[in-house]
Amino acid sequence: MPEGHTIHRLAQDYTSHFAGGTTRVTSPQGKFTDAAALLDGTPLAEADAHGKHLFLGFRDTDWIHIHLGLFGKVNFGAAPPPPPTETVRLRLANDTAYVDLRGPTTCALITPAEKQAIHDRLGPDPLRADADPAAAYRRVSRSRTTIAALLMDQKIIAGVGNVYRAEVLFRHRIDPYRAGKDITAAEWDAVWTDLVELMREGVRNNRIDTVRPEHTPEAMGRPPRKDDHGGEVYVYRRAAMPCHLCGGEIRTADLAARNLFWCPACQQN
């Protein structure tokens, strides 16, 4: 499932290609046909993102709510668009570009009130200007749940997925099994600040890189990572491999229905 930086990057890409001009809106698959017909020919006013939720705004009253889920894909291309396949749920097109949405968990036309209800149930997003990290910490500091599970709870903090969870905990030497109530305010502030920086970098580069400059392949004289995920990381998908810092074995376990990765030697506090 894409992490929050990907959704914010998509919001930027939709805006740069379609904002302000007449947009053709269709649903070749047929599952969004009625809503597409209502929007066809209207300009895209804005695109918004909160956590893993993408919102495309048309006029002042209509929003397309998209959640990619595990299988959703978005593909941009230059005009003229090729004939769509029957798997395309939503196509936006203009004289210069097109974008196809396939396989989302959610693609629905909603009202501003319904959009606000989604924002209200989500935790603060490190990539949003209106984010309140203190609100997230209030919930974290009262919980006996592990910090690794709390970071994946979108009601507490929105947009963090499996990669950022594993990596930010490693970067701050935090044991993923520590209870939220044992995370100090200073530790939370450091984690939040780091997430903001890492996720902004993810938006800029459209990939996740979490190693510090002194731990890059060039700095350490090691081979670059080879993984379909891409990006240089400390522990994610590195189970049974040596830690870049201590040389110990990276561990993996199931936690919060996802594979957790961590270094037991480095993450003891």
Image: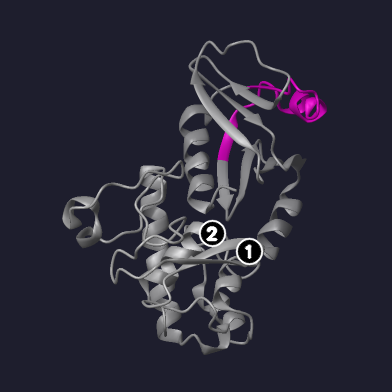
| Residue 117 x/y as whole percent | 73, 59
* Vertical side of 232 occupied by 137: above or below: below
Q: Nearer the viewer, residue 88 or 252?
A: 252
Marks 2/1: CA–CA distance: 12 Å
Residue 123 seen in the figure:
yes
Name the secondary structure under disc 2: helix
Residue type, mark 1 in image: Gln
| Residue 77 x/y as whole percent | 50, 21
Q: Residue at x 44, y 71 (%)?
A: 169
Residue named by callout 1: 154
- Name the image quarter holding residue 34: top right
Residue 41 numbered tag: none
- Name the image quarter holding residue 248: bottom left
Assess disc 2: are there few (<14), some (14-19) or many (≥20) residues with their C-alpha within 10 Å of its C-alpha. Answer: many
Residue type, mark 2 in image: Asn
Residue 162 numbered tag: 2
Q: Nearer the viewer, residue 36 or 149?
A: 149
Q: Nearer the viewer, residue 125 or 230?
A: 230
Q: Residue at x 67, y 41 (%)?
A: 60
Q: Residue at x 62, y 87 (%)?
A: 142
Judge from the rendering whether residue 196 lies leftward or rightward of residue 7; answer left or right.
left
Magenta stretch?
Answer: 24-46
Magenta-drawn stretch contains 33:
yes
